[in-house]
Image (cartoon, rainbow, N blue to C red):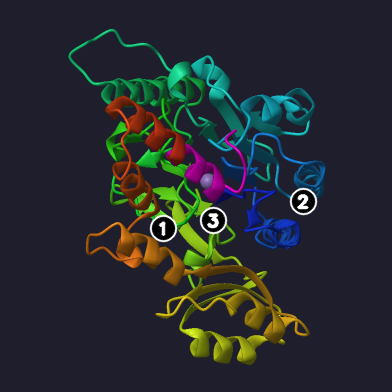
Amino acid sequence: MKILHTSDWHIGHTLYAKKRNDEHEKFLCWLREQIAEREADALIVSGDVFDTGVPGGAAQRLYYDFLTSVLGTCCRTVVIIAGNHDSPGLLEAPAGVLERLSIHIIGLPSAPERHVIAMRGKDGEVGALCCAVPYLRKNEMVRIEDDAVTSDEKIAMATAKFYSDVTQAAISAGEKLPIIATGHLFVTGAMRHDGDGVRDLYVGNLGQVGADIFPKELSYVALGHIHSEQCAGGEEHIRYSGSPLPMSFGEIGKDKFVLEIDTDDGMRIGKITVPVFQQLRAIRGDHETIMRALKGIADDDVWVEVTYTGDGICPGLSADIHTIVKDGKAEVLSIRNNAVLKRILASSGGGETLESMKVQDVFIKCIENNTFEDKHKRELIDCFDEIVAALEGGQSCG
Ligand SMILES: [Mn+2]
Protein backbone atom coordinates (compact mmCIF):
# COMPACT_ATOMS: atom_id res chain seq x y z
CA MET A 1 0.00 0.00 0.00
CA LYS A 2 1.05 3.53 -0.66
CA ILE A 3 0.16 6.09 2.00
CA LEU A 4 0.67 9.84 1.85
CA HIS A 5 1.33 11.61 5.16
CA THR A 6 0.81 15.33 5.62
CA SER A 7 -0.14 17.63 8.52
CA ASP A 8 -0.45 21.21 9.73
CA TRP A 9 -2.28 22.63 6.73
CA HIS A 10 -3.59 25.50 8.86
CA ILE A 11 -6.27 26.37 6.30
CA GLY A 12 -7.44 29.91 7.07
CA HIS A 13 -3.97 31.03 8.13
CA THR A 14 -3.00 34.65 7.61
CA LEU A 15 0.49 36.01 7.23
CA TYR A 16 0.25 39.36 8.99
CA ALA A 17 -3.12 40.49 7.57
CA LYS A 18 -2.79 38.54 4.32
CA LYS A 19 -5.17 35.63 3.75
CA ARG A 20 -3.58 32.52 2.32
CA ASN A 21 -6.59 30.78 0.79
CA ASP A 22 -5.05 30.97 -2.70
CA GLU A 23 -1.97 29.11 -1.52
CA HIS A 24 -4.11 26.49 0.21
CA GLU A 25 -6.24 26.04 -2.86
CA LYS A 26 -3.13 25.49 -4.97
CA PHE A 27 -1.64 23.12 -2.42
CA LEU A 28 -4.78 21.00 -2.15
CA CYS A 29 -5.08 20.85 -5.94
CA TRP A 30 -1.43 19.77 -6.15
CA LEU A 31 -1.99 17.18 -3.39
CA ARG A 32 -4.91 15.69 -5.25
CA GLU A 33 -2.70 15.39 -8.35
CA GLN A 34 -0.01 13.66 -6.29
CA ILE A 35 -2.55 11.16 -4.96
CA ALA A 36 -3.69 10.36 -8.49
CA GLU A 37 -0.24 10.28 -10.14
CA ARG A 38 1.37 8.19 -7.42
CA GLU A 39 -1.69 5.98 -7.09
CA ALA A 40 -1.79 6.47 -3.33
CA ASP A 41 -4.21 4.15 -1.52
CA ALA A 42 -4.55 6.24 1.62
CA LEU A 43 -4.03 9.75 2.95
CA ILE A 44 -3.25 10.64 6.56
CA VAL A 45 -3.61 14.21 7.82
CA SER A 46 -1.99 14.48 11.25
CA GLY A 47 -3.81 17.45 12.72
CA ASP A 48 -4.10 21.23 12.43
CA VAL A 49 -6.29 21.01 9.36
CA PHE A 50 -7.56 24.48 10.16
CA ASP A 51 -5.70 27.36 11.70
CA THR A 52 -8.45 28.04 14.19
CA GLY A 53 -11.28 26.29 15.97
CA VAL A 54 -13.76 28.53 14.16
CA PRO A 55 -12.65 28.45 10.51
CA GLY A 56 -14.55 30.71 8.12
CA GLY A 57 -16.76 29.54 5.30
CA ALA A 58 -14.06 29.91 2.64
CA ALA A 59 -11.60 27.80 4.66
CA GLN A 60 -14.16 25.05 5.21
CA ARG A 61 -15.12 25.15 1.55
CA LEU A 62 -11.50 24.51 0.52
CA TYR A 63 -11.38 21.52 2.86
CA TYR A 64 -14.64 19.94 1.71
CA ASP A 65 -13.92 20.61 -1.97
CA PHE A 66 -10.61 18.81 -1.50
CA LEU A 67 -12.25 15.81 0.20
CA THR A 68 -14.79 15.65 -2.63
CA SER A 69 -12.03 15.76 -5.24
CA VAL A 70 -10.19 12.87 -3.53
CA LEU A 71 -13.29 10.69 -3.85
CA GLY A 72 -12.68 10.58 -7.59
CA THR A 73 -9.16 9.15 -7.20
CA CYS A 74 -7.65 5.75 -6.33
CA CYS A 75 -7.34 6.83 -2.67
CA ARG A 76 -9.69 4.55 -0.74
CA THR A 77 -9.07 5.74 2.81
CA VAL A 78 -8.59 9.19 4.29
CA VAL A 79 -7.72 9.55 7.97
CA ILE A 80 -7.87 13.00 9.56
CA ILE A 81 -7.15 13.74 13.20
CA ALA A 82 -7.63 16.97 15.13
CA GLY A 83 -4.58 19.01 16.12
CA ASN A 84 -4.31 21.59 18.87
CA HIS A 85 -5.52 24.34 16.54
CA ASP A 86 -8.61 22.40 15.48
CA SER A 87 -11.93 22.27 17.25
CA PRO A 88 -12.47 18.51 17.76
CA GLY A 89 -16.23 19.05 17.76
CA LEU A 90 -16.28 21.03 14.52
CA LEU A 91 -14.03 18.52 12.79
CA GLU A 92 -16.07 15.54 14.00
CA ALA A 93 -19.48 17.04 13.26
CA PRO A 94 -19.73 15.55 9.73
CA ALA A 95 -17.86 12.33 10.74
CA GLY A 96 -20.93 10.12 10.28
CA VAL A 97 -21.52 11.21 6.69
CA LEU A 98 -17.84 11.22 5.80
CA GLU A 99 -17.30 7.72 7.21
CA ARG A 100 -19.70 6.42 4.55
CA LEU A 101 -17.18 7.77 2.06
CA SER A 102 -14.22 6.14 3.86
CA ILE A 103 -13.09 9.50 5.20
CA HIS A 104 -12.40 8.97 8.91
CA ILE A 105 -12.32 11.94 11.26
CA ILE A 106 -11.04 11.53 14.81
CA GLY A 107 -11.33 14.62 16.98
CA LEU A 108 -11.37 13.27 20.52
CA PRO A 109 -9.97 10.21 22.29
CA SER A 110 -12.52 7.48 22.99
CA ALA A 111 -12.56 3.67 23.34
CA PRO A 112 -9.28 2.24 21.90
CA GLU A 113 -10.98 0.07 19.25
CA ARG A 114 -12.75 3.13 17.83
CA HIS A 115 -9.36 4.55 16.88
CA VAL A 116 -8.41 1.57 14.72
CA ILE A 117 -9.13 2.20 11.04
CA ALA A 118 -8.71 -0.37 8.28
CA MET A 119 -6.91 0.92 5.20
CA ARG A 120 -7.62 -0.92 1.97
CA GLY A 121 -5.36 -1.46 -1.01
CA LYS A 122 -6.26 -1.58 -4.71
CA ASP A 123 -7.55 -5.14 -4.40
CA GLY A 124 -10.04 -3.99 -1.79
CA GLU A 125 -8.32 -6.02 0.92
CA VAL A 126 -7.20 -4.44 4.19
CA GLY A 127 -3.49 -3.74 3.72
CA ALA A 128 -2.68 -1.81 6.89
CA LEU A 129 -4.30 -0.58 10.08
CA CYS A 130 -4.23 2.99 11.27
CA CYS A 131 -4.26 3.85 14.97
CA ALA A 132 -5.74 7.32 14.57
CA VAL A 133 -4.83 9.21 17.74
CA PRO A 134 -5.70 12.94 17.81
CA TYR A 135 -4.10 15.73 19.84
CA LEU A 136 -4.63 14.75 23.48
CA ARG A 137 -5.65 17.49 25.85
CA LYS A 138 -4.74 17.10 29.48
CA ASN A 139 -8.31 17.24 30.75
CA GLU A 140 -9.29 14.38 28.43
CA MET A 141 -6.50 12.13 29.64
CA VAL A 142 -6.70 9.37 32.23
CA ARG A 143 -6.18 10.61 35.75
CA ILE A 144 -3.21 9.02 37.42
CA GLU A 145 -3.39 9.33 41.21
CA ASP A 146 0.24 9.33 42.16
CA ASP A 147 1.64 12.34 43.95
CA ALA A 148 5.18 11.09 43.47
CA VAL A 149 5.15 12.07 39.79
CA THR A 150 4.80 15.54 38.33
CA SER A 151 1.84 16.59 36.26
CA ASP A 152 3.94 16.45 33.05
CA GLU A 153 5.01 12.91 33.87
CA LYS A 154 1.39 11.93 34.46
CA ILE A 155 0.43 13.26 31.03
CA ALA A 156 3.34 11.43 29.40
CA MET A 157 2.32 8.20 31.19
CA ALA A 158 -1.32 8.60 30.19
CA THR A 159 -0.29 9.33 26.58
CA ALA A 160 1.93 6.24 26.51
CA LYS A 161 -0.90 4.14 27.94
CA PHE A 162 -3.33 5.44 25.34
CA TYR A 163 -0.96 4.57 22.46
CA SER A 164 -0.37 1.16 24.00
CA ASP A 165 -4.12 0.48 24.35
CA VAL A 166 -4.92 1.55 20.79
CA THR A 167 -1.98 -0.44 19.39
CA GLN A 168 -3.19 -3.52 21.31
CA ALA A 169 -6.67 -3.02 19.87
CA ALA A 170 -5.12 -2.94 16.37
CA ILE A 171 -3.09 -6.07 17.02
CA SER A 172 -6.19 -7.96 18.10
CA ALA A 173 -8.08 -6.63 15.06
CA GLY A 174 -5.72 -7.90 12.40
CA GLU A 175 -2.62 -9.99 12.83
CA LYS A 176 0.47 -9.38 10.74
CA LEU A 177 -0.78 -6.20 9.11
CA PRO A 178 1.46 -3.14 9.28
CA ILE A 179 0.20 -0.76 11.96
CA ILE A 180 0.54 2.97 11.43
CA ALA A 181 -0.23 5.44 14.19
CA THR A 182 -0.92 9.16 14.07
CA GLY A 183 -0.12 11.80 16.66
CA HIS A 184 -0.20 15.53 17.14
CA LEU A 185 2.30 16.29 19.88
CA PHE A 186 5.80 17.48 20.66
CA VAL A 187 8.31 14.66 20.85
CA THR A 188 11.37 15.59 22.92
CA GLY A 189 14.28 16.78 20.84
CA ALA A 190 12.21 17.97 17.88
CA MET A 191 13.63 21.07 16.21
CA ARG A 192 11.72 24.29 16.00
CA HIS A 193 12.59 27.78 14.93
CA ASP A 194 11.40 31.24 15.92
CA GLY A 195 8.05 32.34 14.60
CA ASP A 196 7.12 28.94 13.18
CA GLY A 197 3.67 29.35 14.70
CA VAL A 198 3.84 26.22 16.84
CA ARG A 199 2.08 26.80 20.13
CA ASP A 200 3.83 25.00 22.92
CA LEU A 201 2.79 27.33 25.68
CA TYR A 202 -0.71 26.06 26.27
CA VAL A 203 -1.34 26.04 29.96
CA GLY A 204 -2.90 22.75 31.01
CA ASN A 205 -2.29 20.95 27.73
CA LEU A 206 0.05 18.25 26.60
CA GLY A 207 3.70 19.15 26.92
CA GLN A 208 6.15 16.76 25.43
CA VAL A 209 6.84 13.05 25.39
CA GLY A 210 9.81 10.84 24.49
CA ALA A 211 9.76 8.84 21.23
CA ASP A 212 9.86 5.72 23.43
CA ILE A 213 6.16 6.09 24.29
CA PHE A 214 5.29 4.66 20.85
CA PRO A 215 4.87 0.87 20.98
CA LYS A 216 7.48 -1.10 19.03
CA GLU A 217 4.75 -2.85 17.04
CA LEU A 218 4.11 0.37 15.13
CA SER A 219 5.58 0.30 11.63
CA TYR A 220 5.24 4.04 11.15
CA VAL A 221 4.12 7.01 13.25
CA ALA A 222 2.68 9.90 11.22
CA LEU A 223 3.18 12.99 13.37
CA GLY A 224 1.94 16.55 13.18
CA HIS A 225 2.55 19.70 15.27
CA ILE A 226 6.13 20.57 14.29
CA HIS A 227 6.23 22.52 11.06
CA SER A 228 9.54 21.32 9.63
CA GLU A 229 9.90 17.80 8.26
CA GLN A 230 12.01 15.56 10.52
CA CYS A 231 12.17 12.22 12.27
CA ALA A 232 11.59 12.11 16.03
CA GLY A 233 13.90 10.66 18.66
CA GLY A 234 16.34 9.54 15.95
CA GLU A 235 13.80 7.00 14.68
CA GLU A 236 13.37 7.00 10.90
CA HIS A 237 9.83 5.62 11.13
CA ILE A 238 8.57 8.20 13.66
CA ARG A 239 8.19 11.30 11.55
CA TYR A 240 6.83 14.78 11.23
CA SER A 241 5.80 15.64 7.69
CA GLY A 242 5.92 19.34 8.55
CA SER A 243 3.49 21.95 7.23
CA PRO A 244 3.09 22.25 3.45
CA LEU A 245 3.26 26.06 3.58
CA PRO A 246 5.83 28.17 5.41
CA MET A 247 4.06 29.49 8.50
CA SER A 248 6.28 32.57 8.81
CA PHE A 249 9.00 34.53 7.05
CA GLY A 250 11.44 32.69 9.32
CA GLU A 251 10.89 29.59 7.17
CA ILE A 252 11.96 31.19 3.88
CA GLY A 253 14.10 28.86 1.83
CA LYS A 254 13.19 25.73 3.79
CA ASP A 255 11.80 22.94 1.65
CA LYS A 256 8.33 21.65 2.47
CA PHE A 257 7.24 18.05 2.04
CA VAL A 258 4.48 15.51 1.88
CA LEU A 259 5.74 12.04 2.84
CA GLU A 260 5.04 8.86 0.91
CA ILE A 261 5.17 5.52 2.72
CA ASP A 262 5.22 2.24 0.82
CA THR A 263 4.19 -0.67 3.07
CA ASP A 264 5.10 -3.22 0.36
CA ASP A 265 8.63 -1.96 0.04
CA GLY A 266 9.92 -2.36 3.61
CA MET A 267 8.04 0.74 4.77
CA ARG A 268 10.16 2.86 2.44
CA ILE A 269 9.71 6.56 3.17
CA GLY A 270 9.90 9.02 0.27
CA LYS A 271 9.81 12.81 0.42
CA ILE A 272 7.76 14.75 -2.11
CA THR A 273 8.73 18.41 -2.28
CA VAL A 274 5.77 20.79 -2.14
CA PRO A 275 6.05 23.58 -4.74
CA VAL A 276 6.37 27.17 -3.52
CA PHE A 277 2.98 28.78 -4.16
CA GLN A 278 3.85 32.26 -2.92
CA GLN A 279 7.29 33.86 -2.98
CA LEU A 280 8.34 35.42 0.34
CA ARG A 281 11.22 37.73 1.02
CA ALA A 282 12.63 39.14 4.26
CA ILE A 283 14.68 42.32 4.00
CA ARG A 284 16.81 43.61 6.87
CA GLY A 285 19.12 46.56 6.99
CA ASP A 286 19.46 50.32 7.06
CA HIS A 287 17.35 52.70 4.96
CA GLU A 288 19.60 52.45 1.91
CA THR A 289 19.79 48.65 1.97
CA ILE A 290 16.03 48.34 2.28
CA MET A 291 15.32 50.77 -0.57
CA ARG A 292 17.83 49.11 -2.88
CA ALA A 293 16.44 45.63 -2.17
CA LEU A 294 12.83 46.77 -2.65
CA LYS A 295 13.64 48.50 -5.94
CA GLY A 296 15.04 45.20 -7.22
CA ILE A 297 11.89 43.20 -6.48
CA ALA A 298 9.14 45.84 -6.81
CA ASP A 299 7.74 44.18 -9.95
CA ASP A 300 7.90 40.60 -8.62
CA ASP A 301 4.90 38.77 -7.24
CA VAL A 302 6.37 38.56 -3.76
CA TRP A 303 5.31 39.21 -0.18
CA VAL A 304 7.87 41.14 1.82
CA GLU A 305 8.73 41.57 5.48
CA VAL A 306 10.93 44.57 6.21
CA THR A 307 13.02 45.00 9.35
CA TYR A 308 14.85 48.29 9.76
CA THR A 309 18.03 47.88 11.75
CA GLY A 310 19.68 51.27 11.17
CA ASP A 311 20.76 53.62 13.95
CA GLY A 312 18.51 56.63 13.42
CA ILE A 313 14.79 56.50 14.21
CA CYS A 314 13.99 56.93 10.50
CA PRO A 315 10.46 58.37 10.82
CA GLY A 316 9.80 58.45 7.06
CA LEU A 317 10.51 54.74 6.58
CA SER A 318 6.94 53.57 5.97
CA ALA A 319 6.18 56.36 3.51
CA ASP A 320 9.41 55.74 1.58
CA ILE A 321 8.69 52.02 1.37
CA HIS A 322 5.15 52.54 0.12
CA THR A 323 6.34 54.99 -2.53
CA ILE A 324 8.80 52.43 -3.91
CA VAL A 325 6.36 49.52 -4.15
CA LYS A 326 3.07 51.26 -4.84
CA ASP A 327 3.07 50.67 -8.61
CA GLY A 328 4.66 47.21 -8.56
CA LYS A 329 3.39 43.73 -7.77
CA ALA A 330 5.43 43.27 -4.60
CA GLU A 331 3.47 43.68 -1.38
CA VAL A 332 5.07 44.73 1.88
CA LEU A 333 3.18 42.93 4.64
CA SER A 334 5.13 44.16 7.61
CA ILE A 335 7.55 46.94 8.50
CA ARG A 336 9.35 46.63 11.78
CA ASN A 337 11.46 49.52 13.02
CA ASN A 338 13.97 48.11 15.49
CA ALA A 339 15.48 51.53 16.21
CA VAL A 340 12.36 52.64 18.08
CA LEU A 341 12.42 49.49 20.20
CA LYS A 342 16.16 49.84 20.78
CA ARG A 343 15.59 53.27 22.32
CA ILE A 344 13.06 51.84 24.74
CA LEU A 345 15.48 49.11 25.77
CA ALA A 346 18.36 51.53 26.16
CA SER A 347 16.28 53.75 28.45
CA SER A 348 15.67 50.77 30.73
CA GLY A 349 19.42 50.16 31.13
CA GLY A 350 21.25 46.85 30.65
CA GLY A 351 23.37 45.86 27.68
CA GLU A 352 20.83 43.74 25.80
CA THR A 353 19.96 44.34 22.20
CA LEU A 354 16.60 43.54 20.73
CA GLU A 355 18.17 41.01 18.35
CA SER A 356 19.50 38.95 21.23
CA MET A 357 16.18 38.85 23.08
CA LYS A 358 13.11 36.73 22.63
CA VAL A 359 9.67 38.33 22.46
CA GLN A 360 8.86 36.96 25.91
CA ASP A 361 12.11 38.33 27.38
CA VAL A 362 11.23 41.84 26.25
CA PHE A 363 7.88 41.57 28.02
CA ILE A 364 9.48 40.18 31.17
CA LYS A 365 11.82 43.16 31.13
CA CYS A 366 8.86 45.54 31.02
CA ILE A 367 7.24 43.68 33.92
CA GLU A 368 10.41 43.86 35.97
CA ASN A 369 10.50 47.63 35.53
CA ASN A 370 7.14 47.88 37.28
CA THR A 371 6.09 47.15 40.82
CA PHE A 372 3.79 44.15 40.54
CA GLU A 373 3.30 41.46 43.15
CA ASP A 374 4.99 38.18 42.22
CA LYS A 375 1.74 36.29 41.65
CA HIS A 376 0.46 39.06 39.39
CA LYS A 377 3.73 39.03 37.46
CA ARG A 378 3.25 35.31 36.78
CA GLU A 379 -0.33 35.86 35.67
CA LEU A 380 0.64 38.69 33.35
CA ILE A 381 3.42 36.64 31.79
CA ASP A 382 1.05 33.69 31.27
CA CYS A 383 -1.50 35.98 29.61
CA PHE A 384 1.19 37.49 27.42
CA ASP A 385 2.42 34.04 26.36
CA GLU A 386 -1.13 33.14 25.43
CA ILE A 387 -1.50 36.27 23.30
CA VAL A 388 1.81 35.62 21.54
CA ALA A 389 0.73 32.04 20.87
CA ALA A 390 -2.57 33.27 19.45
CA LEU A 391 -0.84 35.83 17.24
CA GLU A 392 1.64 33.28 15.94
CA GLY A 393 -1.30 31.10 15.07
CA GLY A 394 -2.90 34.10 13.37
CA GLN A 395 -6.10 33.80 15.36
CA SER A 396 -7.49 33.66 18.85
CA CYS A 397 -6.93 30.48 20.85
CA GLY A 398 -9.20 27.65 19.86
MN1 LIG B 1 0.44 23.18 13.57
Q: Is residue 13 above or below residue 38?
A: above
Residue at 30%, 66% in the rendered image: 353
Residue at 21%, 18% in the rendered image: 149
* Type of amino acid under label 3: Glu
Disc 3 packing (10 Å; few <14; some 14–19; many ≥20): many
For residue 193, which quarter of the picture? bottom left
Mark 3 → mark 1, Cα distance in angstroms: 28 Å
Mark 1 → mark 2, Cα distance in angstroms: 38 Å
Q: Is residue 375 above or below residue 394?
A: above
Q: Is residue 270 above or below residue 330?
A: above
User: Which residue is tagged 3?
Assistant: 260
User: Which residue is tagged 2?
Assistant: 73
Disc 2 packing (10 Å; few <14; some 14–19; many ≥20): some
Disc on the earlier residue, 1 or 2: 2
Question: Which span is picked out in magenta?
Answer: 385-398
Residue 351 colored in magenta in the image: no
Residue 396 colored in magenta in the image: yes
